[in-house]
Amino acid sequence: MEYQWYPGHMSKAKREIKDSLKLVDVIIELIDARIPYSSKNPDIDELAANKPRVLLLNKADMADDKRTAEFKEYYEKKGYFVLVTNARNGNLKPVMNVVREACKEKIERDKARGMINRPIRAMILGIPNVGKSTFINSYAKKACTKTGDKPGVTTGKQWIRLSKELELLDTPGILWPKFEDKAVGLHIAMIGSINENLLDSNELALKLLEFLVKEYPGAVNARYGVEEKEDSLQLLYDICFKKACMKKGGEPDTDRMAFTVTDDFRGGRFGKISLEKVSDYIKRED
Ligand SMILES: Nc1nc2c(ncn2[C@@H]2O[C@H](COP(=O)(O)OP(=O)(O)O)[C@@H](O)[C@H]2O)c(=O)[nH]1
Ligand SMILES: [Mg+2]
């Protein structure tokens, strides 16, 4: 499998993020709870320069709750302030609580200097499609005051005041996933965050079926009414027959069914499923 890489574009983005980071007290990084390892960009560690880090395990409504809880604990042990979120129905209170906790030192420092009402400033970061815009919009909708340029700070930076306590840079930082790792590329393709035609869609569906049968027994049967088996190509044929997904000549239309399987997965129609679990990654990172 081949993945595309955009070094020029990304190094510019990285520089911009680095500049913006100088202006904020805390970094709020969104990752996809279905792939908490693959959607977490390691560049942020290098860019972050000791800022407090809040990690949002977003799209948790589509992920496996048990696996999400394990990742939450795993990242907390690494020093992140972690929150499980669904950016589509944003509730600001829990976000404020973790941000406040992450910025405890700054708040106390301000207090000691007699600066009581200085809002916390944050920047949203993440790879494409994790929900950055949705997050900003769902909170900004409630508060919706663009605070405009701050004189003396910088030009061209817009801040959104979410509350008296919290301001967000209105443009999120977009980082690229770590595609050199084939498993990362595959998982990102499975959830549909990169352009579909970068990967063979049949192969993608076969890998999904293989994964589901192994890790979530019963999910494929519940969806298509077929007997589950390890041979995912045979399974795809079985699903074609079961669902009468045939070409004009009477042959099973595996291309069309592969598309349906992938689409069903991305739409959450196999249930709440995570492609990754902590135990798969603990050996790699630690
Ligand atoms: N189910 C679900 N969908 C979400 C969530 N957050 C974002 N989305 C959807 O994911 C897609 C990408 O979100 P977007 O905010 O554009 O991602 P961005 O590229 O990081 O800005 C959109 O279709 C959103 O509606 C979430 O928590 N749960
Ligand atoms: Mg966006």
Image (cartoon, rainbow, N blue to C red):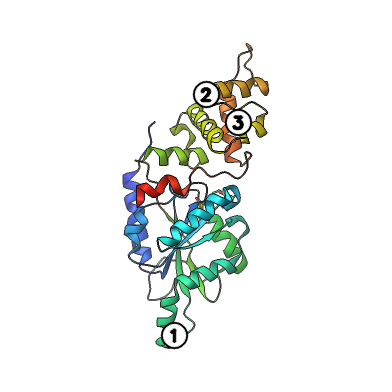
Camera-side residue of 246 and 281: 281
Q: Residue at x 54, y 76 (%)?
A: 164
Density class for disc 3 (Cα within 10 Å; few <14, some 14-19, many ≥20) is: few
Q: Is 7 placed above or below 103 here?
A: above
The numbered mark at residue 231 is 2
Q: Position of residue 199 (x, y in %)?
A: 45, 32
Reading the image, the residue beneath label 1 is 111
The numbered mark at residue 228 is none
Q: CA distance from mark 1 to mark 2?
A: 63 Å
Q: Amino acid at mark 2?
A: Asp
Q: Earlier in the sequence, mark 1 or mark 3?
A: 1
Q: Amino acid at mark 3?
A: Thr
Q: Earlier in the sequence, mark 1 or mark 2?
A: 1
Q: Is 104 placed above or below 116 here?
A: above
Camera-side residue of 141 and 199: 199
Asked if one can make out residue 161 in the rendered structure from this viewpoint, the answer is no
Mark in front: 1 vs 2: 2
Q: Position of residue 42 (x, y in %)?
A: 36, 52
Q: Amino acid at mark 1?
A: Lys
The numbered mark at residue 260 is 3
Density class for disc 1 (Cα within 10 Å; few <14, some 14-19, many ≥20) is: few
Image quarter of residue 237: top right
Mark 3 sits near ligand 1, with its Cβ under 8 Å away: no
* Mark 2 in CB contact with mark 3 (< 8 angstroms): no
